[in-house]
Amino acid sequence: MNPRVPSTLNPGDLLQRVNRDVERSILRARNGIRYVRGTHRPALGATPKDVVWKSGKAELWRYKGGDRRYGPPVVIVHSLVSRSYILDLRPGNSTVEYLTGAGLDVFMLDWGVPDELDADNDLERYVDWYLPRALAEVRRVTGHDEVTLAGYCLGGVLAALYAAGHEDANVRNLILMATPMDFNEMGAMVALLREGRLDPDEMIDETGNVPADALYSGFYMLAPTTEVAQKATLLENLWNDEFVEGFQAMATWSRDHVPFPGAAFRQLVELLVRQNILMTGSMPLGGRQIDLAGVRGNVLNAMAERDNVVPPAAVEPVMGLVGDPGRREELRLPGGHVTFGTGRSAFKHTMPKLTNWIIDHSDPLS
Amino acid sequence: MPASQPLWLRVVLRVERAIGEPIESAVRSDTYFDLISTTTRVRRRVTGTAEGVSRRCLHLLNLPAESDIRGMRQQLSRMERRLNELSDDVAELDGSEPPPGVGT
């Protein structure tokens, strides 16, 4: 055989390749029709769960899983700007499912979708009202006094303020996932508010909240053309059911923001953005001063190296501010802001590392 | 960029980056910030003016405007919020709810 003849001209290979391409074209057509019609949407947030506590829009979910082999229970505090199903995106691709599968007792504190009734919800409402009550319920149903508290994004700020601001918090482990501390490093959208070019009241609508659309536009404008690249990649992989399902799940989540309660937004802009107060190590809340170094448990500061929503530079100061210096650990993960919930890197790095850290800092249940 | 990607996709991704990168730096510029804040203010002013005109017209016909309904909804929401707070307080006094954590 002439060695210069490329192997692709081998008739067997060629036939195989033609077969594969025909097969993929048929699958592309089928999945394309399904995608355009909007049928076959993936099940989001599908891990079975019970609602164990509810107040206003806030709900505390306890996930059903296999054997609960470790304690204390893990309570995830979600952010105020996005939907919590990013951490339970779809079966087989879910942080919650991974944690429960590893034998952890997992709870999620979901804030629901705020409306006019929630416009007066300030940070005190979350840190001093919802969190203590939800965690009291966790203690009641599990029989554990301690908890592992894991806050995602802004949920991490709420979790840290709760853990530092409550004598009876009993947080054995505080996990901060992509939690911003230095708001000067938060990028363009936040700079608009910091520099006073935009007042928080200009963003608040007639319901008293920042509309979800405004938040979506802000995130969209960080990279307005990437949707083209994403759609082109989808077209190329349209034959792959798994890829299409993952794409639809992520596309749904990234457009599915929730309104931000107006009172909390004004406080966030004034204290966290304009005064960058978390960088001082303490923050006034509910008539007292909360010292972030007052967190008594182990602290894990987890950050995503390619996060363009909460960049590593905004997260790194946690290591100098929250908890006891001897009990702080840092976890740098490859991937972006959603690596805590989904993606190849989540499975390879985030989920195993987070789970192992929690198990290492938990007790086996008898 | 993986070599296994077809040529057309590699071209699209390159073009997207070539166009996207300048746009991304533009939306982080002072000019863009000014444009956003001006647009937001102008939009609010225009909406406010239009609402004012339509409100006056509707009031002439003794009809409620959207802003009246909005005001009423806000009042109702405030009342409902207060009722919820009172009902939470009562539930806690009854002992049917776990006590709140103690702030330090």
Image (cartoon, coloured by chain):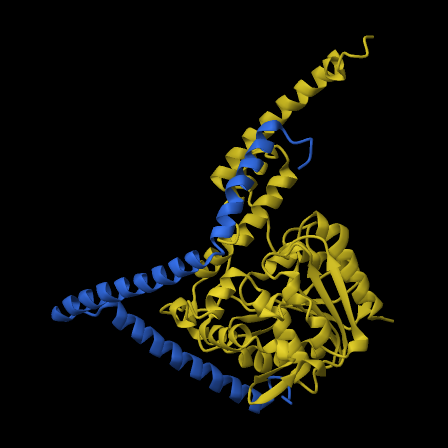
- The residue at the point 68 percent across, 52 percent down is A335
In this view of the protein, which residue sits in the foreground, B72 or A7? A7
Rendering quarter of residue A126: bottom right
Viewer-nearest residue: A254 or A105:
A254
Q: Is residue A251 left or right of residue A96?
A: left
Chain identifier matching the blue colour in the rendered picture: B
Give how far across and how far down residue A194 sits, in percent: 49, 70
Name the residue rendered at 55%, 81% in the picture: A124
Q: Residue at x 73, y 81 (%)?
A: A170
Q: Tell me if residue B78 comes above or below residue B90 in the rendering.
A: above
The foreground one among A295 and A33 is A295
Residue that protrudes farthest toward the top in the picture: A1
Quadrant housing residue A117: bottom left
Vertical order, B56 against A324 (above or below): above
Quarter holding the N terminus of chain A? top right
Residue pictured at 50% horizontal, 41% vertical: B19
Q: Where is residue A366 in the image (x, y as percent from the top left)?
A: 87, 71
Q: Which chain is displayed in yellow in the rendered image?
A: A
Q: On the picture, is A336 further left or further right than A4?
A: left
